[in-house]
Image (cartoon, grey):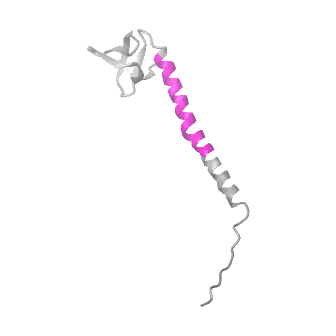
Amino acid sequence: MTHVVFAQDAPAGSGWTSLIFLGLMVVVFWLFIIRPQRQRAKTQASLADSLSAGQEVRTIGGIHGRVISVDEESVVLQVEEGKIRVSRRAIGSRVGGDES
């Protein structure tokens, strides 16, 4: 019984091509997912830090109200006939001309 084995050459540069493709995928992932998420988080954090009594806001759940008081962890909002306490991080945007 005779076995014939043929040697095959790997395509030149296939390792580099895969490495470059992987690098491009990481860059695209960063540009379209990680970077915008960090910008949104930074914007939301600055909004939460700038809250003061009297501002009209909208929570991320869609509740509209006027800020009555602010402490380190929460915000008390005046809504229609009552009050509600929400987390500072739950404030989604200001309502009015300076909408964020």
Q: Is residue 36 above or below residue 21?
A: above
Image-quadrant location for residue 69 = top left
Residue furthest to the right in view is 12
In the image, is 22 to the left or to the right of 85? right
| Residue 21 belongs to magenta span | no
Locate residue 26, reporting x and y percent. 60, 45
Please give the name of the residue rendered at 73% of the width and 64% of the height, measured from the top-left corner: 12
Query: Residue 67 or 34: which is nearer the viewer?
Result: 34
Q: Is residue 28 in view?
A: yes
| Residue 37 belongs to magenta span | yes
Locate residue 86, reporting x and y percent. 34, 19
Residue furthest to the front in view is 1
Which part of the image, by quadrant, shows the N terminus?
A: bottom right
Q: What's drawn in magenta, residue-wise?
A: 26-48
Q: Is residue 22 above or below residue 6?
A: above
Query: Residue 77 or 21: which is nearer the viewer?
Result: 21
Query: Residue 20 or 6: which is nearer the viewer?
Result: 6
Residue furthest to the left in view is 81
The secondary structure making up most of the magenta span is helix
Locate residue 64, reporting x and y percent. 36, 21
Please give the name of the residue rendered at 37% of the width and 14% of the height, measured from the top-left corner: 66
Q: Is residue 82 above or below residue 7?
A: above
- Looking at the rendered structure, the number of numbered marks drawn on it comes to 0
Locate residue 13, reporting x and y percent. 72, 60
Please give the name of the residue rendered at 55% of the width and 29% of the height, measured from the top-left corner: 39
Q: Is residue 97 in view?
A: no
Image-quadrant location for residue 81 = top left
Residue furthest to the bottom in view is 1
